[in-house]
Every structure is written in C-alpha cells, then in structure tokens.
Amino acid sequence: MLPSLERMLRDLDTVLTDTKDFAAERRGVVRIAALPSFAASVLPDAIKTFRASHPGVSFELKDVIASRVIAAVRAEDVDLGFTGGETSFPDIETIFTARDEMMVVYPNGHPIGPVAKVTAQVMAAYPLILMDQGTSVRAVTDAAFNKAGLLVTPASEATYMMTAVGMVKADIGIAILPASAREVRAEPALRSRRIDDKNFSRPVALIKKSGRTLPPLSQSFAKFLMARQLRKP
C-alpha cells in the first residue's frame, strides 16, 4: 500500500500548492472579452506590464463585437468585459468608464485634409465607409449624424477595421474609426484626424456581471486597468 499512499500524498501536496498559489495570485487565468480595437491596442501592453509582477498568470482574451462582449459576461464565459456603447443593464456592473474619440481616416492628398474643422456636414459630402451595424462604432456614428440632422448612406460597410482601412486605401471613400484602433495608423499612405464634434466619441467601459465575485486575479487585473486609466493625462 505504501506506493499508493505516497502517490496520494504527492497529489494532495500538489493540490495544496496550487491552491496557495491561486490565493496568493501567483498562478491562474484571467478571462476577458474585449472589442477588437482594445484587444489589439490597449490590452497587449497592459497584459505585458501586469505579467511582469504576476509571471504565473495567463490570459484568455476573446476579441468580439460589443453585443458579444455583453453576452460573454452575462454567461460567465469571461470574468471581465471591455466594451463600448450602452452598458446600462441591470445584470451588468460597470467598473470604470472612459471615452474613445472617433477619427476620420482618408488618403493622403484628400480634400478633407486642409479643411479647418471636420464636422458631420463636411464628412457627409464624401463617400463614407462605415462599420457594420452590429458594432458600437456604427451606433455612435449613426447617432452623431442624426444629431447633426443628417441621414447618411454608406458607400460601403465593413465588419473589421482593417477592411475599412483597405477600402480607404483603394479610394472607395473615407472611414470613421475609433482613435484606439491601431488600424488607423497601419497604412503610411493614409492620414487621420480628429472629428470636431463631441458626439463622435463613444463611452468605453470595463464591466463584470452584477452580483458576481470575481476571481482574485481578475479582480487585481481590473484594479490595475483602472489605475492605469486614471494615470493617463
């Protein structure tokens, strides 16, 4: 019986060690769903910095559109969600919020470049490449044009921001994309500038399911993201 007892003791010791590491936040998995723009821009640097002090931590990152971020948080498929647009739901708790400005992206030499102020009226005069209607960027864009008294019909729509950038490069039209998106700066032949209208910005939020106690590591990462956001000028 001795070999069996020794094996059981080793297994028990491993379980106890893993439990202690988890409680001490030395090991574990942080599960997070985020908009593709944040998954490719804000989060990689944040994860790298967080892992410097938590080297045993791994991340499960799902890059999905806003509605799927909410759905993943509700279903507890992830611990945290990084999303844009409306988050006022009774079963969703907002940990912190910020703003993400929209930018107009256009080819170098486009007539919109020298314009003193880029407004909804100025952009509506050109063919527009807008994001898919299921995205938070499109919801913000449509609402901003409506507030300016304009109903625009896009020349083309794209689900992925890199596709929109490719369309701009092909001179199909100008695109409206969030400043957080790295795709805005992906092509040297393209230019981008801020839109002079406060309505062209979206609220962004770090969220969790209401009433749910987060795992210790996910809670620590949420606090880390909040502190990182507050340190920004």
Image: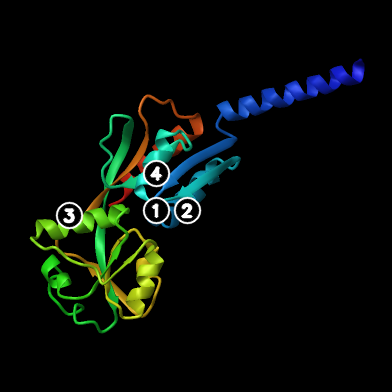
Determine which of the numbered discs, if any, sits on residue 38 in the image.
1
Q: Which mark is residue 143?
A: 3
Frontmost residue, 231 versus 165: 165
Of the two numbered discs 2 and 1 in the rendering, the one whose residue sits closer to the viewer: 1
Secondary element at image label 1 = helix
Q: Disc 4 marks which amino acid? A: Val
Q: What is the CA distance from the residue labelled 2 to the residue labelled 3?
A: 30 Å
Pointer 2 residue: 44
Dot 4 crowding, Cα within 10 Å, few <14, some 14–19, many 20+: many
Give how far apart the Cα atoms at labels 2 and 1 are. Answer: 9 Å
Name the residue: 20% across, 67% down: 153
Mark 2 and mark 1 lie on one chain; the one further toward the N terminus is 1
Q: Nearer the viewer, mark 1 or mark 4?
A: 4
Under mark 3, the amino acid is Ala
- The secondary element bearing badge 3 is classed as helix
User: Residue 91: x and y, percent?
Assistant: 33, 30
Q: Is residue 83 above or below residue 156?
A: above
Image disc number at residue 69 = 4
- Crowding at dot 3, Cα within 10 Å, few <14 / some 14-19 / many 20+, comes out as some
